[in-house]
Amino acid sequence: MIEQHLLLKRVDFIFVQDTDWEKILQKSIHRTKQELINELISSELKGRGGAGFPTGLKWKLTSEAAGDEKYVICNADEGEPGTFKDREILTRVPYKVLTAMAVCGFIVGAKNGIIYLRGEYKFLEKPLKDAINEFSYFCNKINLDFTIKIFMGSGAYICGEETALFESLEGKRGEPRNKPPYPSISGYRKKPTVINNVETLAHTYTIFKYGAKKFYDLGVQYSRGSKLFSISGDTPKPGIYELELGMSLQDFVDEFGDGDTKAVQVGGASGFLVPRKKFHETAIGYQGKLVGISLPTGGSMMIFNSSRSMYNLLDNYLEFFREESCGQCTPCRIGCQQLLAGIKAVKKGERPAPYLDKLLKLSETMQYTAKCGLGQSVANSFASIVENFREEMIY
């Protein structure tokens, strides 16, 4: 039977100031690599960028990949609308991320780490460099051959996609690559690469410090541990909160809504809009359809009350996707334009209401044929808004 934890529970691991990072690093590199991998696998930590790939498996595959040149990359290109947690981690507890990168390098056999920092986070570059300098000094002191550098992005949403990020790092246009091969085999410079986002690395620090069980005991089956949520919109409690995974969306709304919550956008513009009638049956996590509806999220939770127009919301999202599409593949390049033009035509009465069904089929086609997650995820918000708030698309 699948566990279903329905009570919202706050926890506090990520932002707890920790002066023990030197001890954690030393302790970790004196364990065997297999012990560390087993610890991660036992914790059942999944990537906190939204995709939910098992972190321990990712590190294991990269450690087993052939080659002496390997890399560890921290994806700090926090470009998803409504997400603002990673910058706080790098501001308040940067040593947790740096330590996790170094331990990862030790496990997989990488000597070089790179933090790909969002272009809009230029203000973080100087304090991060200062932290890296202190961290590097300690690494030299304990004879750990691992260096970390910062690479500044240029504000392209597409570069949050891991292979487009690699292309950007290599000085090329930020466009996704075909998969396979996957990064564990061919990543940055076509070498085996571990790429995790900021929050995922911070959670690995927690696991290396406290052990897998403390993390595993949080959350529910298939959704272990805690998660940072960036909460914004029509809420009296905006901000960043660390919550246990597996909560129901109704519990979330009861805690953070304003008493008139109409819908919640789970996972940013590329996620799903959940209407009020589905709050009770929707859980936040990676359980899929095992508990009714379960939605993963990179952290963005945008709350909308009855004063908000769902048509305006969708129009805004499609404008964003149209601008941020890299244009490499036809389904995304043309599809985003046509979806945007389509809803405008229906709203103006230039197209009949049933035209929305054709647009839904187009979004479904994009989901199956677009080259990367940008084009594939447009259907998430489009379908969830059109299907649940069709009347607002027409009148």
Image (tube, rainbow, N blue to C red):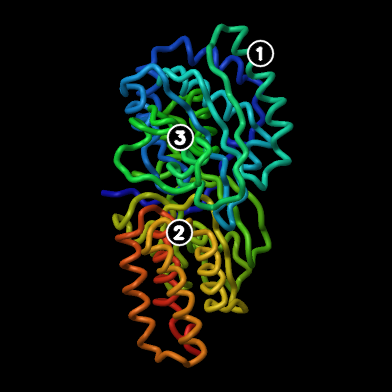
Q: Seen in the image, is 253 located left or right of residue 163? A: right
Amino acid type, label 1:
Tyr
Q: Could you tell me if the residues under marks 1 and 3 are in contact, i.e. CB atoms within 8 Å?
A: no
| Residue 142, image x, y percentages | 58, 7
| Residue 301, image x, y percentages | 55, 58
Q: Is residue 248 above or below residue 259?
A: above
Between disc 2 and disc 1, whose residue precedes?
1
Q: Seen in the image, is 306 located left or right of residue 272? A: right
Q: Could you tell me if the residues under marks 3 and 2 are in contact, i.e. CB atoms within 8 Å?
A: no
Q: Residue at x 39, y 66 (%)?
A: 379
Residue pointed to by mark 2: 327
Q: Residue at x 41, y 60 (%)?
A: 375
Quadrant of res 361: bottom left
Q: How many marks?
A: 3
Q: Residue at x 40, y 54 (%)?
A: 373
Between disc 3 and disc 2, whose residue precedes?
3
| Residue 212, image x, y percentages | 42, 28
Residue pointed to by mark 1: 137
Residue pointed to by mark 3: 195
Amino acid type, label 2:
Gly
Q: Mark 2 against mark 1, which lies toward the viewer?
A: 2
